DNA sequence: AGTATAATAT
DNA sequence: GATATTATAC
């Protein structure tokens, strides 16, 4: 460079390139050194440069890094490297060079001989980065456990961090994860809500029909599609909804499987088989849907495994999708594998009572006693999902009477929900227990199987509810099986309010009652969602059972019940004992989609947390 | 503490 | 390249 000396070059580089420069010169004149440094050189090495000097130029990288985050700090060790070179200049030089004017990035190597060696890896950002925290299942489990222990309200990053007691984990890490976790919870709740809405919507034939068709899926996808978590979580619900409509065959097979007793992880595969059969709607079932269904099942299984029953196979069978990951954690944190088992076992009526007792006590007494709302939620979700998977799949799209069945199911569902609600309320349960009661009640409405599931869930949810749960279930189960209609009638008065709330859109009372119950909104909404879902499931399962047993006989009862329920809805909580005997009546009542929808919406609306998105 | 958003990872 | 996950900034 005949027309330019090192200082000019340095200046040029400083102006045009964002590069740290180390000057090399044979001239050791301090003035020149100063000049170089003041013009932006990081360092000034006097030739001949010793290898050791070059080997230590990496320190500039350190300096630069330190400088940016904190302030310029010169550690003694750094200084010692400098051998008579101008240190002072370094900082300024770096700063100068880093002026991002029009950052022209050029390969640094060529700039200086020296530069080659030091610069290469000096990506600024590199060294300081702390490794990303990977929220493994275990870590997440800890997290969930901590959240549960604290209770959702008190679960703030700092406290969670303390409880988790994981080295290296920062509050920020936890905060970030908590953010995601909350998002996830919301999704779940919203899903449930949507499901509920869908169900309500189904009240009308049209809606129902649509559901059966692609539209339903579309909705599902829309809901679930967004996130992994959502998918996993949603899938169960969705599938249940979908499946329920779809086909009895699948449902039956599932039930049979379940009825055998406790589902084993391996059985999950069984589900696959049935699912595949659903093939009547290949397009629909294909892809994510099947996957979802399976996932849901797997998720519940995983929970079981984690908590009680350990089915390694199960986990293995299901590819651990992200969703399942979260899902599992949630369940796990709930802590009891029992839930999952229960649901499965629930299919056999006879075993129900037994199951209940067993489950109830252990669950209550154990970790779950103190479950936080979050836990409850998760449990519900789990239960729900499980149920769905079990129940799912019975639709026969092709069946001519599909619509009718569907309606019936819906009605059953509603009735069950109301019934449950009523029972709960009536009962003997304290206000605080209402929620739990509701959930338990819902199951009772359903088949014995359903009942068992309900009972199970209830205990888990609330320790306090244990006694009630037992009583309710034990007592209620027989009644249900034998006297659906009567039961309904009896409970009507007592729980009209609740049923209204759940079933009907309108109820003003609902909010008030909820408030009294002191349930946290999120929990509540979630539960509601669960309840709704459960009902749906129940309805579906009922239908299936009926189908198996003999549609005709079963349906009439169902209808009457439904009619009753609907009637209530119509009346907005005024529970008349009258029931709709004729199918037409039922239909009339039933076909008020907006109504139902609205009602559900209202109910969910209470749950600020979850439903915000939904609404 | 909570959110929004950037940075990264998948 | 689209998403999901985590880190950061506010």
Image: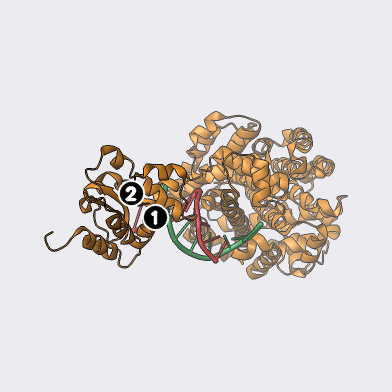
Chain colours: A orange, B green, C red
Which of the two residues, A352 or A135, is positioned nearer the viewer here? A135
**Residue on which disc 1 sits:** A88
Residue drawn where x is 42% and y is 51% of the image: A65
- Say which mark, if any, is on residue A516: none
The quarter holding residue A49 reads top left
Q: Quadrant of residue A371?
A: top right
Residue A558, x across and y down, in percent: 71, 53
Q: Position of residue A238 (x, y in %)?
A: 55, 53
Measured in 3D between alpha carbons, the distance from the residue under mark 2 to the one under mark 1, in whole angstroms, is: 9 Å
Pinpoint residue A471: horizontal percent, then vertical percent.
84, 41
The reply to whether residue A40 is in sight is yes
Q: Is residue A539 above or below residue A259?
A: below
Q: Judging from the image, what secondary structure is the residue with disc 2 in?
A: loop
Q: Residue furthest right?
A: A428
Tell me if residue A234 comes above or below residue A456 in the rendering.
below
- Which subunit holds the residue at mark 2? A
The residue that mark 2 highlights is: A85
């Amino acid at each position: 460079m005949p027309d330019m000396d090192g200082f000019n070059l340095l200046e040029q580089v400083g102006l045009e390139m964002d590069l740290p420069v180390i000057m090399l010169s044979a001239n050791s004149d301090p003035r020149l050194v100063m000049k170089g440094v003041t013009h932006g050189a990081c360092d000034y090495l006097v030739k001949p440069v010793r290898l050791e000097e070059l080997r230590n130029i990496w320190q500039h990288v350190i300096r630069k890094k330190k400088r940016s985050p904190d302030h310029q700090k010169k550690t003694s060790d750094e200084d010692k490297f400098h051998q008579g070179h101008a240190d002072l200049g370094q900082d300024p030089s770096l700063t100068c060079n880093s002026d991002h004017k029009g950052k022209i990035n050029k390969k640094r190597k060529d700039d200086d001989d020296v530069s080659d060696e030091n610069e290469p890896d000096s990506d600024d950002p590199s060294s300081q980065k702390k490794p990303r925290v990977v929220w493994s299942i275990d870590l997440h489990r800890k997290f969930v456990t901590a959240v549960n222990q604290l209770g959702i309200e008190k679960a703030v990053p700092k406290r969670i961090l303390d409880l988790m007691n994981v080295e290296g984990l920062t509050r920020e890490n936890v905060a970030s994860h908590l953010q995601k976790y909350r998002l996830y919870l919301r999704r779940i709740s919203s899903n449930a809500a949507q499901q509920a809405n869908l169900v309500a919507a189904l009240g009308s034939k049209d809606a129902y029909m649509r559901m059966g068709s692609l539209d339903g899926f579309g909705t599902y996808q829309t809901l679930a599609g967004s996130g992994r978590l959502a998918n996993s979580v949603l899938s169960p619900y969705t599938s249940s909804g979908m499946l329920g409509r779809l086909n009895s065959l699948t449902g039956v097979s599932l039930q049979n499987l379940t009825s055998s007793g406790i589902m084993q992880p391996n059985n999950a595969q069984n589900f696959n088989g049935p699912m595949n059969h659903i093939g009547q709607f290949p397009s629909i079932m294909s892809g994510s849907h099947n996957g979802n269904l399976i996932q849901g099942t797997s998720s519940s299984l995983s929970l079981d495994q984690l908590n009680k029953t350990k089915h390694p196979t199960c986990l293995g069978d299901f590819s651990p999708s992200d969703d399942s990951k979260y899902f599992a954690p949630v369940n796990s944190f709930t802590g009891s594998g029992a839930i999952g088992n229960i649901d499965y076992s629930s299919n056999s009526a006879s075993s129900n009572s037994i199951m209940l007792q067993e489950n109830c006590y252990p669950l209550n007494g154990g970790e779950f006693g103190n479950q936080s709302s979050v836990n409850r939620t998760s449990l519900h979700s789990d239960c729900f999902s499980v149920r769905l998977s079990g129940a799912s799949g019975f639709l026969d799209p092709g069946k001519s009477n599909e619509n009718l069945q569907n309606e019936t199911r819906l009605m059953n569902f509603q009735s069950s929900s109301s019934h449950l609600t009523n029972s709960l309320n009536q009962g003997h349960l304290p206000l605080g227990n209402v929620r739990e009661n509701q959930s338990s009640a819902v199951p009772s409405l359903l088949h014995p199987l359903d009942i068992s599931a309900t009972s199970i869930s209830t205990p888990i949810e609330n320790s306090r509810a244990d006694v009630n749960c037992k009583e309710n279930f034990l007592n209620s189960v027989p009644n249900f099986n034998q006297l659906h209609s009567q039961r309904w009638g009896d409970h009507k008065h007592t729980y009209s309010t609740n049923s209204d709330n759940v079933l009907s859109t309108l109820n003003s009372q609902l909010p008030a009652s909820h408030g009294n119950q002191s349930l946290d909104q999120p929990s509540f909404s979630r539960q509601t969602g669960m309840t709704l879902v459960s009902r749906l499931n129940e309805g579906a399962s009922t239908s299936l059972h009926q189908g198996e047993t003999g549609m005709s006989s079963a349906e009439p009862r169902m209808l009457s019940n439904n009619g009753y329920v609907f009637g209530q809805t119509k009346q907005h909580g005024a529970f008349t004992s009258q029931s709709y005997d004729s199918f037409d009546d039922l239909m009339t009542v039933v076909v008020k989609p907006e109504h139902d929808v609205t009602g559900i919406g209202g109910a969910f609306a209470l749950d600020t947390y979850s439903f915000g998105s939904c609404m």
